[in-house]
Image (cartoon, rainbow, N blue to C red):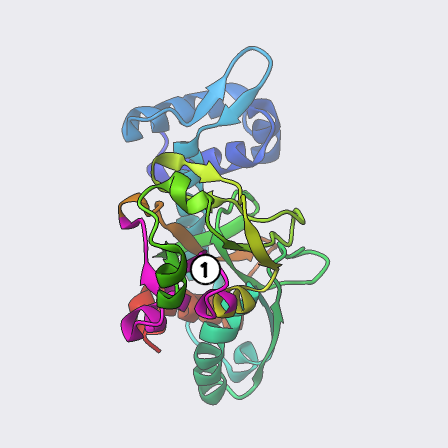
Amino acid sequence: MLNRLEMMRIFCAAAEANSFKEASAKLRISPQSVTRAIKALEDKVGEPLFYRNTRQMHITDFGEQLAQRARESIANIDDIFARSNKTTAADMAGIIRIAAPTTFGRRFLPPILSNIAITYPNISFELKLSDAIADVVEQQIDIGIRVGFLRDSSFVARATSKVYFYTVASPSLIERVGEPQTIQQLLELPSIALLNSNSGKSWPWYFDDGQQYKHKHVSFMTDDPETELNMVLSGNGFGQIADCLAAPYLQSGRLVRVLTSHTPPPWDIYVYRPQRGPVPARIRMVYDEIANAFSNMQTLKSA
């Protein structure tokens, strides 16, 4: 009988393959062994991990979430046996390339990296800020941060905390046009739209129960969240702003939340790194430091 770690290794290989046959070839075991391991794991977790028929298979949403957690756990176990008992000064020297969303990275990463740089002066950082999804291969990214969705199975990823998006406006705008009581009323009022850097289209507004709406009356559009926030603060329109950006202005009264009963579910903040051979000690350390800091997001939001 396979132990749990072996089952997880087989499952992760299957999650990254197009078929159980492909996974079996990669692991050098029989396709029947892969099928048995997946069935045994499904029985243990009590959830289907793949949708499969005679021609193809697809991993389930639960399976994707389990695969992300499993890769992280397996990588940590492998690191235990890969690393020596002592970390030398040479292990903590060299460049680390990090990719992060522009505003998020600008606001929250510098203090974390500054503390690491003081402790480990031989580590240097290259921080790339962009709201477009980073090409980790072309840009040689060692560590990335992403807000929202992370479906790339080639990453070791950790969901650290969550970001809420609030529908907000300035008091002056509400005094001028009134406070909407329904989503439909909101859509008839001026809005500030944020461009999706990957698609070139504006992000829809999200609400509870999976509702999404396109902007009807856009008074200003930008691909920069800081500019979006400033235009909302200036009273030019309603906006959906991340709680980590809106918090100080809500506390001071410069912004007011509307339609609070329709607040959408939060998005995850992921810290990820590619899987490409042995991971240097400095990258493991910085990855853990960033992930731990983001896990205590309330401290970051009040910074």
Residue situated in front as seen by the camera: 183 or 23: 183
Which residue is rendered at x = 50% and y = 54% of the image?
Answer: 191
Badge 1 is on which residue?
A: 79
Whether 292 is among the magenta residues is no
Residue 99 placement (x, y as % from top left): 59, 65
Res 80 quadrant in image: bottom left
Instruction: Specify the quadrant that holds the C terminus.
Output: bottom left
Residue 50 placement (x, y as % from top left): 46, 24
Q: Secondary structure at mark 1?
A: helix
Whether 259 is among the magenta residues is yes
Which residue is rendered at x = 41% and y = 62% of the image?
Answer: 173
Residue situated in front as seen by the camera: 277 or 221: 221
Which residue is rendered at x = 52% and y = 44% of the image?
Answer: 204
Q: Which residues are magenta?
A: 231-260
Residue 65 placement (x, y as % from top left): 41, 40
Query: In this view of the protein, can residue 280 be seen by the observer?
Result: no
